[in-house]
Amino acid sequence: MSTGALKKLKVTAYKDDRYSEKVGDGDFDTLLNPETYKFTYKVEYTEAQGQGTSATQPKYVRTPPEDLELDFLFDRTGVLKGKSNTSGDGIIDDLETFKRIVFDYSGDEHKPNYLMIGWGTLLFKGTLTEMNIEFKLFGSDGTPLRAVAKTKFKGSVEDNLRVARENNNSPDLTHIRVVKDGDTLPLMTYRIYGDSKYYLQVAQVNNLQNFRKLKAGQKIMFPPIEKAT
């Protein structure tokens, strides 16, 4: 049940793509919650056409991470409680703080920070791809007092979560499987390809000297079926 308390959209910066190590002073609470936000989803296909054919049959390639578009308001006009231009710098300091979190280059990771954006049912993980800042109102001396940062983010999912979500068993993809007690190479090969006859090729790809004695915890690579034939 809602308590009626106003929750602000929050951006939290992380150093790693598993979102386990937060950046110091890497939290940003939006001044006003957004009126809208926009997700964009895409599906990529190849349109390669065979020689001598008159039409193409699009073939699925992948589903890239979703994009998020979101606007952030910055205001020091005094209209909003506690946000007057007391420093004389207008919204410059506010923008610099925001840019440091979402845009600036991280020397440790050699790339911008990983970001988690949360508000209500919105929980998004990704990185900034584009930001445009539009200045809208100025003081008598030209100091910017209001601006809107229009941002675009590219989604990302941790590898272990991505694998669990996709659970993709297509024989056209490379798979890494961990041996469990009772597993045999023919049985594991059957699970991937639907036929155990490829187990010798899998053993060769993995340089298994004794494929009859697999050890629990051992990792086995199963290549696309074309490479195993």
Image: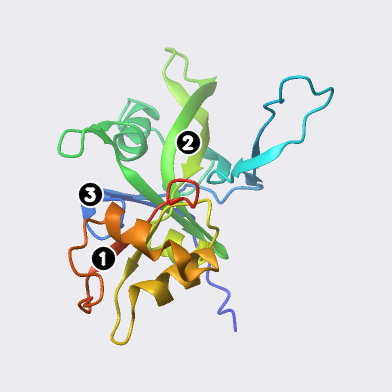
Q: Earlier in the sequence, mark 1 or mark 3?
A: 3
Give the residue type at disc 3: Asp
Q: Are marks 1 and 3 in contact (CB under 8 Å)?
A: no
At horizontal 51% and vertical 63% (from top left) the residue drawn is 193
Density class for disc 3 (Cα within 10 Å; few <14, some 14-19, many ≥20) is few
Left or right, 199 with reference to 121: left
Give the residue type at disc 2: Phe
Query: Which one is in front in this view, the residue at disc 2 or the one at disc 3?
Result: 3
The N terminus sits in image quarter: bottom right
* Secondary structure under the numbered disc 3 in the rendered image: strand
Q: Judge by depth and name the residue closer to the eye, 102 or 44.
A: 44
Residue 18 visible somewhere in the drawing: yes
Query: Which one is in front in this view, the residue at disc 2 or the one at disc 1?
Result: 1
| Extreme-bottom residue of the structure | 182
Residue beneath label 1, please? Answer: 219
At horizontal 33% and vertical 78% (from top left) the residue drawn is 184
Q: Judge by depth and name the residue closer to the eye, 89 or 30.
A: 30
Q: Earlier in the sequence, mark 2 or mark 1?
A: 2
At horizontal 36% and vertical 38% (from top left) the residue drawn is 102
Per the model, the C-alpha gap separating discs 1 and 3 is 40 Å
Residue beneath label 2, please? Answer: 74
Per the model, the C-alpha gap separating discs 2 and 1 is 51 Å
Residue 83 visible somewhere in the drawing: no
Q: Earlier in the sequence, mark 2 or mark 3?
A: 3
Per the model, the C-alpha gap separating discs 2 and 3 is 19 Å
Q: Are marks 2 and 1 in contact (CB under 8 Å)?
A: no
Residue beneath label 3, please? Answer: 25
